[in-house]
C-alpha cells in the first residue's frame, strides 16, 4: 500500500495541475474534441461554450450558500462541542482517519451537500486535535465519503418522480425500493462503507512527506465592553435579534416538513444551516464574523462552476455525449449494459461533474438503449448514479468546498483519492458483474 501510495502521490504532484488550471485544460480538450470528433466548426464550439457558461449560476450560488452557511454553523459553540466529542474518540492517527471517512460517508448518505460541509469541518478539527496526522490524507479520507449514493441522490429520485423525462420514453416510474433500497444496492453501499474505512485506516503518508494541520484562523479582536457601545452596536450584539429573525425560517421549515415530510433538497439544506446558525450564534455581529471567516472557502466554487458549465455546454451542443454513449451501447449485451453504463457515466462525469445535469443529457440515451436491449432498468439507473459518484473522487470539482475549508490544493489530496477510486471501482464493477450471473 505504501509503495502504491508513494507512486500515486509522485505522479499527481508532478503532473496534475491545480483545480483551476485543470478546468481550463478540460475546456480546451472538450473544445478541440468537439471539432475533431463531431465535426463542429470553431465558431459553433465557441457559441456552445458561451451558451453553457451561465447555466450553473443558480446551482453555483446554491453550493456557495451550502458551504457558507454550513461553515458558519460549524463555528458555533454547540457545533464545536459536538466536534470535540467526536474528535475525542480516536486514540491514534489510524483511528482518526477511519472515523473521519465513516462520519463523512454517513453525512453524505443523508445529504451530499450536508456531508461535504461536515466532512470538511471534521477534518479540520481532527487535524487540530490528533497529533501525527498527515492532514492532506485526512482531507482525502473526508472526501472519500462523497462517493456514496443515498436518499438525496438526484438520479434515482428523478426516476421515481411522476412526469420525468423517462415517462415520455415509455419507461414506467421506478420506485426507490427498486433502486436505492434494493437488496443488492444496500449490500453494495455497506461494502463501500467497509472498504472506505479499511482503505483509509491502513493508508499512510510515505516517509518524509508528513504535513500536520496548521491553524491559520486569524485571532479575534477583544469585544467592546457593553457600557462603551453605542445603541446601534448594542443591537448588533443582542441575541434577541438572532432569535426573532431565526424564528421566521424555523417556522417555515416546520410547516414545510409537516406537509411534505423530511424530504431534503439543496434549498432546504441552506435554510436549515442558516436557521441553526442564527439561533446558535450569540448575536448578529458574531454571525457576520463567522461569515467573514467562511467566505474564503467559497472562492473555488465561484470561479470554477461557470467553467464546467461552459464545458457542459460544448459537450451537449456538439453531440459528444451521444457519440460516447452510443459507443458503449454498441459493445453491450442486456446483461452487461448496467456495467457499461457505470463506466460511461464515470467517464462523462469527468467533463460534466453534476449528477442531475449529466442525467438530463446522457440519461435519455441510456434509458432508450436499455429498453431496446431489454436490460434491467433499475440496475441501469443505479449504475449511472454510481458512475457519477465514482469519478468525483478524481475530479476536483466536488472537492472544492473541502479544499477551501482545509486551505489545500487538489494536488495535495488527489494521489490518495486515486487509490480509493481504484478500490471502489473494482467493488462497484464486481457488483454489476455479479448481477449478470443471476
Image (tube, helix red, strand yellow):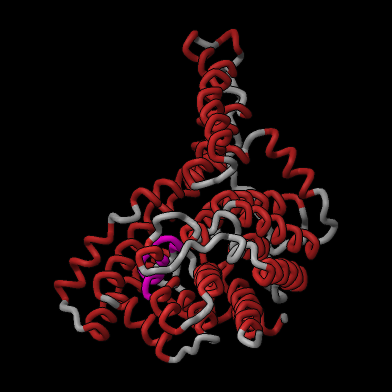
- Which one is in front, 98 or 331? 331
Q: Residue at x 54, y 51 (%)?
A: 113
Q: Position of residue 313 (x, y in %)?
A: 28, 66
Q: How many marks?
A: 0
Q: Residue at x 83, y 60 (%)?
A: 92
Compared with 254, 226 (above or below) is above
Residue 94 picture location, percent across and down: 79, 65
Tell whether 436 sits left or right of 268.
right
**Residue 412 seen from this side:** yes
Which stretch appears magenta?
Answer: 354-365
Q: Main secondary structure of the magenta part?
A: helix
Which residue sits at x=77%, y=48%?
86
Nearest to the observer: residue 167 or residue 190: 167
Residue positioned 40% across, 46% down in the render: 61
Q: Quadrant of residue 71?
A: top right
Is 357 contained in the magenta span? yes
Estimate the x, y position of residue 190 in percent, counting from the top left.
72, 67
Along the line of sight, the residue nearer the viewer: 141 or 13 = 141
Amino acid at each position: 500500500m505504501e509503495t502504491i501510495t508513494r507512486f500515486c502521490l509522485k505522479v499527481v504532484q508532478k503532473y496534475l495541475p491545480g483545480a483551476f488550471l485543470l478546468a481550463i485544460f478540460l475546456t480546451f480538450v472538450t473544445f478541440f474534441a468537439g471539432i475533431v470528433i463531431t465535426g463542429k466548426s470553431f465558431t459553433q464550439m465557441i457559441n456552445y461554450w458561451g451558451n453553457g457558461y451561465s447555466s450553473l449560476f443558480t446551482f453555483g450560488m446554491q453550493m456557495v450558500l451550502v458551504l457558507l452557511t454550513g461553515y458558519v454553523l460549524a463555528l458555533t459553540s454547540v457545533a464545536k462541542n459536538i466536534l470535540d466529542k467526536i474528535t475525542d474518540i480516536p486514540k491514534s492517527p489510524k483511528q482518526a482517519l477511519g472515523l473521519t471517512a465513516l462520519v463523512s460517508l454517513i453525512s453524505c448518505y443523508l445529504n451530499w451537500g450536508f456531508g461535504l460541509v461536515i466532512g470538511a469541518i471534521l477534518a479540520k478539527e481532527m487535524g487540530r486535535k490528533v497529533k501525527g496526522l498527515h492532514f492532506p490524507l485526512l482531507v482525502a479520507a473526508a472526501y472519500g465519503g462523497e462517493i456514496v449514493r443515498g436518499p438525496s441522490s438526484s438520479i434515482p429520485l428523478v426516476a421515481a418522480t411522476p412526469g420525468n423525462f423517462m415517462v415520455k420514453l415509455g419507461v414506467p416510474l421506478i420506485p426507490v425500493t427498486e433502486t436505492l433500497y434494493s437488496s443488492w444496492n444496500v449490500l453494495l453501499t455497506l461494502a463501500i462503507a467497509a472498504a472506505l474505512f479499511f482503505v483509509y485506516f491502513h493508508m499512510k503518508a510515505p516517509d518524509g512527506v508528513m504535513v500536520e494541520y496548521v491553524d491559520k484562523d486569524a485571532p479575534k479582536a477583544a469585544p467592546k465592553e457593553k457600557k462603551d457601545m453605542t445603541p446601534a452596536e448594542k443591537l448588533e450584539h443582542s441575541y434577541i435579534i438572532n432569535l426573532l429573525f431565526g424564528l421566521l425560517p424555523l417556522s417555515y421549515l416546520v410547516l414545510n416538513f409537516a406537509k411534505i415530510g423530511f424530504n431534503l433538497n439543496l434549498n432546504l439544506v441552506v435554510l436549515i444551516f442558516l436557521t441553526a446558525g442564527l439561533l446558535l450564534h450569540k448575536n448578529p455581529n458574531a454571525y457576520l464574523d463567522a461569515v467573514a471567516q467562511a467566505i474564503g472557502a467559497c472562492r473555488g466554487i465561484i470561479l470554477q462552476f461557470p467553467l464546467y458549465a461552459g464545458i457542459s455546454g460544448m459537450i451537449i451542443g456538439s453531440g459528444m455525449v451521444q457519440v460516447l454513449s452510443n459507443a458503449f451501447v454498441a459493445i453491450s449485451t442486456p446483461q452487461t449494459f448496467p456495467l457499461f453504463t457505470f463506466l460511461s457515466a464515470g467517464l462523462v462525469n469527468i467533463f460534466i461533474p453534476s449528477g442531475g445535469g449529466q442525467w438530463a443529457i446522457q440519461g435519455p440515451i441510456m434509458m432508450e438503449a436499455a429498453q431496446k436491449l431489454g436490460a434491467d432498468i433499475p440496475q441501469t439507473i443505479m449504475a449511472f448514479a454510481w458512475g457519477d459518484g465514482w469519478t468525483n473522487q478524481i475530479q476536483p470539482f466536488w472537492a472544492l468546498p473541502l479544499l477551501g475549508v482545509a486551505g489545500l490544493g487538489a494536488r495535495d489530496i488527489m494521489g490518495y483519492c486515486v487509490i480509493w477510486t481504484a478500490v471502489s471501482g473494482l467493488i462497484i464493477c464486481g457488483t454489476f458483474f455479479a448481477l449478470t450471473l443471476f
